[in-house]
Amino acid sequence: MSEQPTIILFALFPGVTQLDFTGPHQVFSRLPNTQVLMASTMGREITADGIVFGGLSKLADVPSCDVICVPGGAGATDNAIADREFLNELRRLAAKAQFVTSVCTGSLVLGAAGLLVGKRAACHWAWRTLLEPFGAISDEGRVVRDGNIITGGGVTAGIDLALTVAAELAGPDVAQAIQLGIEYAPAPPFNSGRPELAPPQILDLVQRRMSTAAQQRRDAVRAAADRLVPRCEN
């Protein structure tokens, strides 16, 4: 009898950042004996950065998975951390998963589900400190592991996270073969991918663009963290 496939599940929500999950999906889909699923709360199609993704499973219909991955998504994350049904499904699936993972602000969603209390976690640099109201310890790392929790920084870190998880599931040789197969050898034309490296005027520009959403996100995180307190105290 053949060995059961490894089940990797992306838990998606409307407005998710597509590269947060399509980057890792490219890596995971090349793992041997692995089934990669995408699911949303109602199993309906979602739009991500103008791309429509259909054929999704309903989260409640997924009995279990070996790896669950939660991406982030600009303002959409604020809605996800307030979606109690979505958070309940994450808690259920995470309870039996070998690895619980996220990309970008997906770690805020894990935090809102109560899965990061006392855990070190990564997030997009602009929102990293917002992990703390959920009882998490913010970490500047591009990929951060604490027990079976593996989290990635902003957007492109999802590929690094996926290769890290691939090495855990199938060994470093398989992960490196996938890396070579997709020619993942970053050589960006500008050295401005992190706030401490970007020119001051570029950092200021991006921070000003994000400032409009900053208070709304802080309010959303505070509300989600307040709902989480009774759960943490029980």
Image: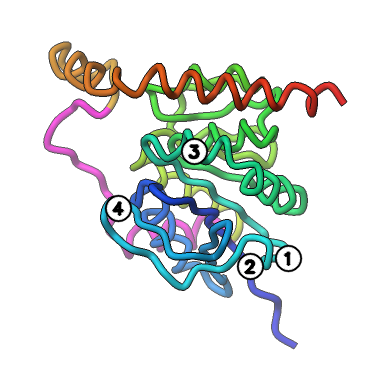
- On the rendered image, what quadrant is the C terminus found in? top right
* First-in-chain label (3 vs 4): 3
Q: Which residue is denoted by mark 1 in the rendering?
A: 63
Kindly report the distance in space between the C-alpha atoms of the residues bearing marks 2 and 1.
13 Å
Q: Is residue 36 above or below residue 16?
A: below
Q: Nearer the viewer, mark 1 or mark 3?
A: 3
* First-in-chain label (1 vs 4): 1
Dot 4 surroundings within 10 Å: few (below 14), some, or many (20 or more)? few
SS of the residue under disc 2: strand
Q: Which residue is denoted by mark 3 in the rendering?
A: 79
Q: Which residue is denoted by mark 2 in the rendering?
A: 6
* Segment colored magenta: 170-193
Kindly report the distance in space between the C-alpha atoms of the residues bearing marks 2 and 3.
30 Å
Q: Which residue is denoted by mark 4 in the rendering?
A: 184
Kindly report the distance in space between the C-alpha atoms of the residues bearing marks 1 and 4.
33 Å
Q: Position of residue 79 (x, y in %)?
A: 49, 38
